[in-house]
Amino acid sequence: MEQVVQTRGLYKTFPRKGGAAQTATHYCPGCEHGVLHKLIGEALADLDLQDRTIVISPVGCGVFAYYYFDTGNVQVAHGRAAAVGTGISRTQNNAVVVSYQGDGDLASIGLNETLQAANRGEKIAVFFVNNTVYGMTGGQMAPTTLVGSKTITSPEGRDPVQAGYPLHMAELINQLRAPVYIARVSFSNMGKLRRARQAIRKALEIQRDGKGYAFVEVLMACPTNQKMNVEEATRFVAEQMEVEYPLGVLRDRAAEAVPIVRSESDYAKETLDRIFSLDTDRAPDAQLTPDAPTFRVKMAGFGGQGVLSMGIILARTACQAGKFVSWYPSYGPEQRGGTANCGVVMSGTPVGTPLVTASDILVAMNRPSLEKFLRDVKPGGLLLYDAAMGEVTPPAGVRALAVPATRLAQEGGSARAANTAMVGVLAALGGFDLPERAYREAITCNFAGKDAVVQANLAVFDHARAWALEQELP
């Protein structure tokens, strides 16, 4: 009598795959992905972990693992399995996270994420399929391709002078202190398959107990791309791959490892509102006023001139006044002296984009910024520029005012507050129709906890605003 053994941990049929063959996988004949799937599924079922497990399948031959595993499943972008796995593990503390990756995904585009997650000891069981070739994309050379092996991108064989040597991921991860378990296995004979089964179960037991990072490298061939039959593929693994990549357990600290207990993540809206002070009077809900004008303001200058802070104060003011608002910064890497600019959009309707490509008002604190952004000011727009840069001829239709920002700041009592002086001028001449109270609250919020600084900036704001009210725009 024929006995059919039902695989555990996998779906009985694969309707997600589509097509008529509901019990066939998408893998090529002779491919051992199916063997690894069965061993992982069996272990998850035996350990009663299916309801806790989330299998992550990034780009690669295993990308459709969610067709098969009777668990939670998440597909992720190429190389990002470790990053997503970290997020899942840290937000779902009881989850058993399984990352199923190939050599192109883990050892190439995702190498940094892999090493960083391993170095942190994230609670992830990583099953790394090393078949020495990019299988899904047609057989290109991989980081693990053997020296001399021919692929479509190394038709003369891998040359270490040109392409480096095969990357030994298990040994590389073994240099890190945090991982609990590291092993390399193959299925090239029954004895090795049994040892592989033990390694897979050990990695999942570590996840069951919350003890940290486990890494199991699985050696396979790719019969289709390497143009081998099953017998040749088995010999290739045993006689060539296992010479380059010795099998064995490189590390097993499961016995002494203790469960990792992290504080519970709280992403409730109420919590986030409290953290970002969104449940206070400083952040009232915007009021829909379709008839209100929309203002797009660009502020620019050197790094260190307070340009971004100036934009934040204006954005806070508009927010406090019930406007829809955005603030979008852009700055160079220099701590001081580099360029910086920001765009502020204030509107009576939701802001469609924070980008200010055509401005109603330009505030320029230096000449390079003036020359860069002046052409973007709309006809009828306003240019406020620091008088220290000298004579400026605005384009036709653009009104301009030279603002002695540093002098106004000094007269107001704080020479360092030239940016706040510009805010005072904006309050007087910008036409925003924002209450003075909102400006003062925004300045107070911007320098919260520094009472002397708050008072100094309020004094500069008042002085500059009074000066601006006496000016006549062209």
Image: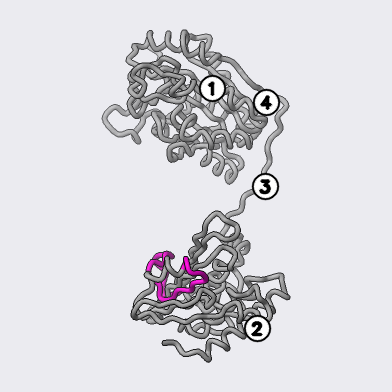
**Which badge, 3 or 1, is on the more N-terminal residue?**
1
Which numbered dot is residue 191? none
Q: In which quarter of the image is residue 3?
A: top left
Do callouts 4 and 3 mark residues in contact (Cβ within 8 Å)?
A: no
Q: Circle 4 is placed at which residue position?
A: 254
Amino acid type for the residue under numbered disc 1: His
Which numbered dot is residue 411? 2
Work out how far the residue at label 2 is from the one at label 1, CA to CA, in angstroms. 67 Å
Q: Residues within 10 Å of mark 1 (few under 14, many from 20)?
A: some
Tell me if residue 366 is in the magenta stretch. Answer: yes
Eye-nearest disc, 2 or 4: 2
Work out how far the residue at label 2 is from the one at label 4, CA to CA, in angstroms. 69 Å
**Which badge, 2 or 3, is on the more N-terminal residue?**
3
Q: Is mark 1 on a helix, strand or loop?
A: loop
Q: Where does residue 74 sit, x and y in percent of width and height?
A: 46, 40
**Which badge, 4 or 3, is on the more N-terminal residue?**
4
Residue 166 in view (yes/no): yes
Eye-nearest disc, 3 or 1: 1
Q: Residues within 10 Å of mark 3 (few under 14, many from 20)?
A: few
**Which badge, 2 or 4, is on the more N-terminal residue?**
4
Do callouts 1 and 4 mark residues in contact (Cβ within 8 Å)?
A: no
